[in-house]
Image (cartoon, coloured by chain):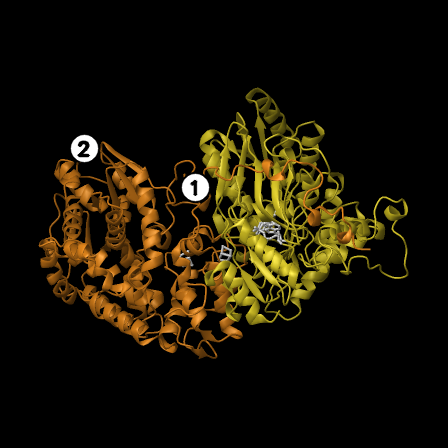
Amino acid sequence: MDRRNDSLDPRETGNPYDSVDATERQTDSSAQVSTSGGPGAHGAGSPQDIPMDTYAAGDSIRQTVGRGRPTETGSYIFPAFDDHHPPEKDLIDDCVHCGFCLPTCPTYVLFGEEMDTPRGRIYLMNKALDEEPMTDNNVRHWDLCLGCMACVTACPSGVQYDKLIEATRAQVERRYERSPQDKAFREMIFQLFPYPNRLRLAAAPLKLYQRFGVGDKLHKAGVMKLLPKRMRAMEALMPMLNEQQDVPEVTQPVGEKRARVGFIKGCVQRVFFSDVNSASVRVLAAEGCEVVAPKLQGCCGALSVHAGREEEFQGFARKLIDAFEGLELDHIIINAAGCGSTLKEYGYLLRDDPEYAERASAFGEKVLDISEFLQELGPVAERHPLPVAAAYHDACHLAHAQGVRKQPRQTLKQIPGMDVREIKEAEICCGSAGIYNMIEPEPATELGDRKARNVLNTGARMIVTSNPGCMLQIQASLKRMGESMPMAHPMEVLDASIRGEPVESLLER
Amino acid sequence: MEHDRLVRTMEAILGPEGVISEREQLRSYECDGLMNYRVIPELVVLPETAEHVQQIVKLCYDEGIPFVARGSGTGLSGGALPVESGVLIVLSRMRKILEVDIPNQRVVVEPGVLNMWVTNEVAEHGYYYAPDPASQLISSIGGNLAENSGGVHCLKYGFTTNHVMGAEIVLPDGTMVNVGGGKAPDAPGYELLGAFVGSEGTLGIATKITLRIVRKPESVRTLLAAFKDTEEAGGAVSGIIGAGIVPAAIEMMDSLCIEAVETAVHPGFPQAGAILIVELDGPKAEVESQFEQTVRICEENNASEIRIAEDDTERALFWKGRKASFAAMGRISNDYYVQDSVVPRTELGKVLKRISEIGEEHGMRVANVFHAGDGNLHPLVLYDNNVPGEAERAEDVAGEIVLTCLEHGGSLTGEHGIGVDKKKYMPKMFATEDLDTFQLLRCAFDPHQICNPGKVLPTPRLCGERPGPFRMHPVQKAGLAENF
Ligand SMILES: Cc1cc2nc3c(=O)[nH]c(=O)nc-3n(C[C@H](O)[C@H](O)[C@H](O)COP(=O)(O)OP(=O)(O)OC[C@H]3O[C@@H](n4cnc5c(N)ncnc54)[C@H](O)[C@@H]3O)c2cc1C
Ligand code: SF4
Ligand code: SF4
């Protein structure tokens, strides 16, 4: 007997029971969709703290699920990985599939599906390790990882996702054939960014172009729209160039010498943010450090290693180790978060190189982020007041990759008058992620805008962060939203305070 | 329907970005939080609205395609395990908080909203969402509803079922209905909401859920007490409950578990055979006097150390240690297999002793972390999937543990659900007639057996099919129900 044939079944006869439509009971569909978050965030500590904004999925989901993406090449590589450092099975096995890493993974936040989560990516690695080929699809999902390492912070099982994704990326770069366009674009980036001189040359025309407002005119004329998306993304990110200042090879400490430190100048930092380097050196000297900044120092290779370009990285790393060898330094100081996390890993990354392995780990052990170092050293220079509300943005490669969260905040809070504000969703990446915002502009833009909104919501007058990439990214998003906010590296703020500059020196830039 | 046409039809509903059909991608959905069971679904779909869900389900119904709902995939009983040649409906893109109605103490959410977001959303008003599974950071409200999830604070505040006021559900034939009350607390008629909560995705898919939120208590006190072994800790638990105190939570962890969380999140727990975390909340005066009493009872039961959380930070640290315990098992073991049987509190000591014996007999390590207040055990059988045969042995150990609990008058599951994992034990706990009554209910919602088939009830039968020689169900005999 099937009840469904019974004429009393309401599903077939409509609703015979009463005259009132059941939908009246439903909640008003016009009810406001809440996008505001909960209480203030507490900085990037535990994911428990994030009051999450609940947005609907944005357009960038098309970049990952669905057929017929431009990046597809129809590759089928089996076995997926070769014997040269595939992602380690032992590390993969640490993952118990609990999902605790999902809520802070930016691609999960954007796309809401499994393959673009740490849990999913590790699962794909595991499958590729023993059963499945390397295809456009799994490469796509690994490519879309920002390498922000929020998952490393969140994981209670201690899964070393950083090592897993680095190994996977090196395999992809070696074995997977990208589409010609994709390849050319990546090559262009890697011929440019790690080389300060080339970057400076490339940026020179940009300088003119900015001075005469050509960009704005082109934007108005809609000409920019004709450029490929990735080029447009690059253009939007280019900062105004300031006068270049190089830091001296040796800077003497103010007062009694408390330490002798090496100073790494970075690539993007050196070209676009040379002020940050000068400020850092002044601060170090003011705190009693003799600062040694070897003239001949190239890129640290962070961009290369994050993109799986293993050999290129090793070349850079060896040169940098050479440059700092024999200088008898107490520490080696870096002020860019993205470089710092790689520098600290030199030992692991060069573990196969008999000539350099040991030197690399000795080098890595000396590396400290500048605010980490300053807090360890303790302040001596007098801080003058800077009465301003500043939002502090955790750079992923500082907070997640190096666990440095308290120190930069402390550095700022030691300045009288400074009101340090927390940004909601602090642990979610701003989308900059090295070269990610140039290679994957759509998701990066959505993340950037989300971050920019959260920054604006703090009501702060300025934003402070330790990574050049984050600054460019957030600035670009603010600009797109028709907003602007002064930005500074913590060292610029501290430098202004120690030198007794007025707050305006930071705000009017 | 053949695969390509199904893909195209789904794409017409959801757009290409809402349909996953490539093998490598499908594989990332082949299991949930319980990795022992894996099935690659035919298709994964990612609806963004209730209408999407309705259209998908309608299509499945018309074409006779089985489907399974999935939230965040953290379930520990294989509830969201896909079915072969079936569609997995993943709700993780339905994650909007639709309405926050503080005066009526309710929040309306889409099913993919994560448990923690609800509390975060209302915290500034002094409210929170009480059910707090250890997976609250990531488990979805839809999944919580389907599993009737509970957490450490459910001893006093009740499980998910006590905090859901109503739900919009797409039935297995694509009809959309509302069950439960609206703004008013109670609704007449059959308690369909009660039947739906805990149904493990077998009666339909929730697309909108109304939750009750509660005010933060005036005062909260938390202590951590260390004991020589689980037996002494168990004595303290009995003492506290026996004294008429209803703590917000009493949790126990054994030494293996303490070791794992220490390496994972460094809560600074003492080295001990067992620790208890006891939390009291409520009006200040009451909490203070009962807290003193609790401390005394712990001391009387030979607690070697008692730590009292001085502030929210310290309290959060205690709980962080507790809540990370499953996930932290990765630190001491490659894989684990977790059970969640419930035993009468009075039997706790005996059952724990037997559990450690079972582990020893099979040469397997078993870690224990559990809701001591209501006797809800979570024995974690540690094993290594790469060692051939270990997974099976772990399952055997877990099975014996379950049977032991049943022998002591316990129940199969406190909060993780039956899923595929424990359905084989259902006949040990229920008589055939009981199971048949479940089946009758299920058939009323899902006559064609397409909604999460093969879960919860053993030996899946078609509706109307009886095992063995025909016997009329007692409910039928009494004329109370018909065989659909
Ligand atoms: C580390 C860890 C700790 C845990 N701790 C606890 C705990 O303390 N207490 C506890 O109770 N549980 C706990 N769990 C189990 C799990 O988190 C809960 O069962 C949770 O409710 C599942 O939610 P989910 O969103 O992951 O659902 P899923 O696993 O995706 O699905 C679970 C079930 O719900 C169904 N379902 C999902 N969404 C819907 C919907 N919208 N409508 C109808 N059915 C639906 C699925 O079909 C499936 O049967 C833990 C899990 C892990 C991994
Ligand atoms: S590194 Fe960042 S983007 Fe990549 S999986 Fe981890 S959390 Fe997600
Ligand atoms: S990476 Fe860590 S947090 Fe994420 S699923 Fe695996 S064990 Fe859990």
Location of residue A340 by image quarter: bottom left
Whole-percent x, y for residue A20 in the image: 64, 35
Location of residue A444 by image quarter: bottom left
Whole-percent x, y for residue A389 in the image: 25, 35
Determine whether the residue tagged by mark 1 lies in a helix, strand or loop. Answer: loop
Q: Residues within 10 Å of mark 2 (few under 14, many from 20)?
A: some
Q: Earlier in the sequence, mark 2 or mark 1?
A: 1
Q: The N terminus of chain A is located in which quarter?
A: bottom right
Q: Residue furthest top?
A: B285
What residue would you read off at disc 2?
A: A385
Instruction: Name the residue nearer the viewer: B174 or A154.
Output: B174
Determine whether the residue tagged by mark 2 lies in a helix, strand or loop. Answer: loop
What residue would you read off at disc 1?
A: A51
Instruction: Name the residue nearer the viewer: B100 or B79.
Output: B100
Q: Is residue A173 left or right of residue B38?
A: left
Amino acid type, mark 2: Pro
